[in-house]
Image: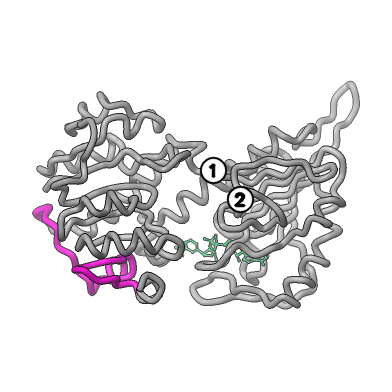
Amino acid sequence: MRIAVVAERRPGERRVAALPATVAPLVRAGHEVVVASGAGVAALADDDAYRAAGATVVDGDVLTGADVVLHVRPLLPADAGALRPGAVTIGFASPATEPDGVRALRDAGATSFAMELVPRISRAQSMDALTSQSLVTGYRCVLEAAVRLPRFFPLFMTAAGTVPPATVLVLGAGVAGLQAIATAKRLGAVVQAYDVRPSSADEVRSMGATFLDLGLEVLEGSGGYARELGEDRAQRQREALAPYVAKADALITTAAVPGRQAPLLVTSDMVEAMGPGSVVVDLAAESGGNVQGVVAGETRQVRHATVVGLQDAASAMPADASRLYAKNVANLLALLLDDAGALALDLDDEIVDAACLTHAGAVRHAPTRLQAG
Ligand code: NAD
């Protein structure tokens, strides 16, 4: 079987879907692995490292004739068009926001697996790229705040006097938010956090942070995710959060609702009330932003506050982000192979069924089918 590893083509993307450590077992199992030249360089895997793992490195097209294609960001529609019917693709597919790409995969007759559709059940944890990449982005966003804050995060008691610790407020305590809390704690900050899901309060406290009890009703949707708030509830939440935002040295926002634009948690007025030197890092900037007026990839000044619209946060740490992602991809691929190493798609398997986006000329994932037409 010919397994292709693409060089990511989207601007700002520095991760790779397979590393020499995940290529070597595939080669040992008798597969031909073809890697686009330079695909892993930013992730600290050069062409020679892939060759040493038994792969063939080629300049240019790796898609034509591939049986399996491994990628990070969604394939561009033109690239999907180069796939042979029946080819299997594994990678992020952004089904909710990139219907053209989904249609291209469908029309090519590809069997595509979308990493964001892998169900969040125990058996699929080793394939859960949303979690592994959120770990990277949650860590990274705190570093982005720390380097911009003109103050220390930790308390220092020195002969020259005592320096109080910074106060960090984290809004949204899912996988990325909890990692942001852990990272800010490791750096010594005093950390407060808030999330709409009731189960998040204990998780926040277990990290040594203070959970803000705003006295508002809690909300949890299906699958342990948040539900979108009604405007009245959202407004009351913003009002209740305003004094905490005003006092924070660093504000980190990570809130998301699956398939929706990111909820607006912080208005410009709230940011304008923050103190001198304060920093805001919005991890949700790419999906609309939790902070009013934020633009992904841009840093701007709102009165005293430096507001960062974080973009490609996982790609800022391509080596470890790729290490985790490549393992997620390898584990999902293993689920699609039989003991002899041949493709054997069991569409009755809960994980295979949920993650399969297109198959045999149709969009299998029902919500995406409605959108892609
Ligand atoms: P996510 O990225 O969709 O959302 C991030 C956080 O934003 C969530 O905690 C959500 O509750 C919060 N949020 C949404 N709207 C908000 C608002 N208006 N105000 C404040 N916070 C808001 O979620 P995620 O981090 O990918 O995961 C969320 C849940 O899934 C968690 O319960 C997590 O433990 C669970 N999970 C389970 C597994 C598993 O069982 N294998 C794996 C990963 C995650």
Residue lying farthest to the right in this orientation = 161
Identify the residue at image location x=68%, y=46%: 281
Mark 1 or 2 closer to N-term?
2
Residue 256 found in image quarter: bottom right
Which corner quadrant of the image does residue 219 belong to?
A: bottom right
Relative side of 270 to 139, left or right:
right
Whether the residue carrying mark 2 lies under 8 Å from ligand 1 is answered with no
User: Residue 238 at x, y = what percent?
Assistant: 78, 65
Q: Residue at x 26, y 35 (%)?
A: 36
What x and y, as percent, mark residue 165? 81, 39
Mark 2 crowd level (few <14, some 14–19, many ≥20, 10 Å Cα)? many
Q: Amino acid at mark 1?
A: Ala
Q: Secondary structure at mark 1?
A: loop
Camera-side residue of 345 and 124: 345
Image location (x, y in percent) of residue 98: 41, 60
- Looking at the image, which residue is at 35% across and 64% down? 123
Cα separation between marks 1 and 2: 8 Å
Q: Is residue 336 magenta?
A: no
Decide if residue 178 is in sight here.
no
Q: Which residues are magenta?
A: 340-365
